[in-house]
Image (cartoon, coloured by chain):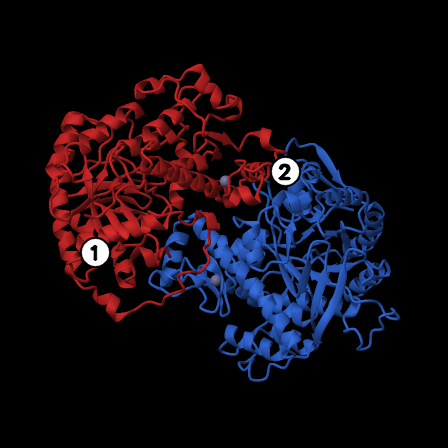
Amino acid sequence: MPNASILREYGRGAHGFLCLEGLPVLASNRDPTMYEFGARPSTDKELYVSIHSGGHTVSPERYMETVAALQPDLYVTLCDEVTADAKPKRVAASVKRTTAWLEACLRLHATHQQQPQQEQEQQPPPTGPQDAPQAEPADQAPASTSAAGAVRNAADGATASSGGGPLAGSLALAALAGGALPAERTRAAAAVGERDGVGGYALCGLGTGEAPEDRPALIAASLDALPGGSLDSRPVFASGLVSSPEELLEAVAAGVDLLDCAYVAQVTAGGYALTFPLRPPPDWQPAQEGTTSAAADTNGAAAAAAGPAPDASIGADDTKINLWSTSYRLDKGPLLPGCGCFACRHHTRAYTHHLLNTHEMLADVLLEAHNTSHTMAFCQAIREAISEGRLERYRAWFRSLRSAPLVAAPRRGGTAKRRAEGDEEAGTEAGAAAAAGCAAPAGAGRASGPAKWVRV
Amino acid sequence: SDSPALKFKVVAAQGRARSSRMTLPHYTAHTPMFMPVGTQGSVKGLTSAQLADLDCHVILGNTYHLENRPGSELVAEMGGLHGFINWQRGMLTDSGGFQMVSLLHLAEITEEGVTFQSPVDGSRMLLTPEQSIGIQNRLGADVIMALDDVVPTTTNDPARFVEATHRTTRWIDRCIAAHSRPTEQNLFGIVQGGLDPELRRISMEQLVARDLPGYAIGGLAGGESKDDFWRVVAQCTAGLPPGKRRGTGTGASGARPMSKPRYVMGIGYPLDIVVCSALGADMFDSVYPTRTARFGVALVPEGVLKLKNACFARDYRPLDPGCSCPVCARGTPRAYLHNVVTRGLASAAGLVTLHNIAYTQALTRAMRQAIEEQRFPDWVRGYLTTMFPKGDVPGWVRDAMEVAGISLEGVATAPRPPAGRAADREAAEAQGQEGGLGSAEDKGQGQEGGRGLKRAAEPVTGSA
Ligand SMILES: [Zn+2]
Ligand SMILES: [Zn+2]
């Protein structure tokens, strides 16, 4: 994104600038596909970030200027993020800073809510038809318009009384820091609480090296420290913490509502197409009824239900296939039989393999169309399971699919970086992820709780 | 036409320009027509569905690249190029020879064919007319091109042009003999002869005698001056089988030769497309619109927008308010495109590519409509006025329009700009070309460069 002054002059925010009218936009503080941590230490006054245009220092003032120029539906407040291996002292400093910056961000939010945007009134930019066809394959369009509505409703509710400024319709997601230390996460979340102006929460610092199995406890340390009922009306966003479908499912079970597209970008960059099943067969039964912990213990019968084991020699695992494999040279089938996405309806595995092999851009286009569609459908299936009160059963089924221990997709530095350059990160400060296209609104987060996102 | 795989019908003509319907096995294409180049079975990030939405009628595949990867045998097994890339409209493949000569070291033309060094293992390889046609038969495009002996017009060796002209004729006979699918694919011959009108005349006479379904004008767009370029096009469009409408002089019974499509290879600058159409050409291809998009250059009626230019950082207008492509229709600000283009993002190239293809298709569509409504000269005048608001229409365009019978009174009002190479280079600069006409990548028939292949500094033209 260009600097904030250009966006401010433009006056129609990220929606207009990125041609995302009608879609909710979330401005994240972090691009999980390229964020570089701690190239230089931050101070209490400013965050140091290193991005495509070099190193920058970002004060809460500069950060909120940019957020105001983006006019997002949701945004993450400024966070001094640390990686999972950060020393306790560093984590404590990050919590202290992030808490202080939240204070500053909310204060500035109030200012930007009120400030009328002069430029906008003076120079109304040209408007294009909003229902025009998209440059991307149609299937990359958001699958869930209700998610958009929910965000808007939440935003309206939080700011109904505020006046015409650029952030009048924006929801602040308070950054919850604390690294990989549960006690620090609890302390950080308790300090945030339900203070005025907090419209939701962002779990920061996850997906930075902590073991996936430790993650639910870290999420719980943050969310359980919040006052009772505060999550009933506030969404929880998490960036970059998913590198497998299990992790997405477990994050949702732990209370996450919104996730960014890092996982889709990661598998696409590796030449993978997601192929895991989305719904249990109607007659599926857990290996041992009753206890959820037993379901994690995959037994032979459950593994057999998942079908033949994937051929690891051609880069496949239980969740995806690798189209670089020469075994697809003559494969006339779609990426995933039965999938209704654009790529699967129109093109073969053989063609995708050829496009990868010849380094044609279209390979990424097709794989991303499919992987986005599949991930959205996965979220839809999870939402259904939650709203029908059978999430535990769904999780047990999903765990039973794995015939082999979970293998994380290899992170390829080079390709991840290349992918990242295709994303729209907001200048030095905020990564504007198109919430509709990238994030995965799960509708309701807590495993057993009622549907969230209902404004009270 | 009497080809079983091609029906060519001129539906309207005005002056030398004509609007036609070319019925191919897979699609009825409308001409004048621009054909985007899908080098390796894909047009730079666009899906075949998007190409259809952009009103593309025929797209190109490059035989040399496709035979390297994935190979014509595999393509045949996958249902031909149409099935492999899922493109249900028209397709055209080139012979592969030009790419070898322009891309590979040690390529050499002998009577047998084009010999070259394999980029894979360095071994000596040979592409004969028979092999080229065999590969193209397997790829299965609607139009296939003869292997020709193409000599860059900049070569300073008259004897070489004589040899190439006659060899091209000898090779067309070998191509015809090798062509195994004449009822499903159309073999086009390629007129050679450099800049020599007499050689061009001989080449046309010999090729027309073979009564092929269509004819290409080859050897151009390779660095010759614009003056030379348009004169060759004018001579060949006049010399190839006539394009009179049925009932206005051409007996359907065939006392005079039937009308045939005329294809100028390697032409992609919008102004060149307009001039060639005015001179009676029907088909064009070039990587220019897609390649220039990757440099951040957008085609607009006024010329080009070099989006990297700082003046676009705060320009919130769409690329072209009159364009109906998805990028413009959504109002994508130039400032956004400037931002992503200057950072070299792949997504930026995709957006500008989409617009540029839409632009070329809209351009040819507008010409067809103007011809059919018998207002083509007015349309040309309007086009030139928009592009040259100061009236400084280049001299070669003025000369070509005079031959085309289109008056530029009130349009070419400024004194005639200086002619020659410098002016041509300037014009190329204005089209957004990085290195002007001298750039090897823009040479010849505008073919997409091979990735990772060494490129000869000067095209090898073979030895005695
Ligand atoms: Zn699919
Ligand atoms: Zn456009």
Q: Is residue A426 left or right of residue B28?
A: left
**In which image quadrant can residue B446 be found?**
bottom right
> How far is disc 1 from disc 2 in space, using C-alphas?
52 Å
Q: Which mark is residue B69?
A: 2
State the residue in front, B108 or B37: B37
Chain under callout 1:
A
For disc 1, the neighbor class at 10 Å (few under 14, some 14 to 19, many from 20) is: many
User: In the structure shown, which secondary structural element does the residue marked by tag 1 occupy?
Assistant: loop
Please state the horizontal and vertical placement of residue B120, each as a whole percent of the image. 64, 33
For disc 2, the neighbor class at 10 Å (few under 14, some 14 to 19, many from 20) is: some
State the residue in front, A304 or A309: A304
In the picture, which chain is blue?
Answer: B
For the residues beneath circles 1 and 2, the answer to whether they share a chain is no
Residue placed at 23% from the left, 52% from the top? A155
Residue placed at 49% from the left, 77% from the top? B389
Residue to which mark 1 is pinned:
A167
User: In the structure shown, which secondary structural element does the residue marked by tag 2 occupy?
Assistant: loop
Chain under callout 2:
B
**In which image quadrant can residue A218 be found?**
top left
- Residue A5 visible at all: yes
Residue behind label 1 places its C-beta within 8 angstroms of ligand 2 = no
Q: Amino acid at mark 1?
A: Leu
Name above or below for residue A86 compared with residue A72.
above
Please state the horizontal and vertical placement of residue A166, each as a whole percent of the image. 22, 59
Q: Amino acid at mark 2?
A: Arg
Residue behind label 2 places its C-beta within 8 angstroms of ligand 1 = no
In the picture, which chain is red?
Answer: A
Name above or below for residue A148 compared with residue B74.
below
Name above or below for residue B260 compared with residue B346.
below
Q: Is residue A120 left or right of residue A298?
A: left
Q: Which mark is residue B168?
A: none
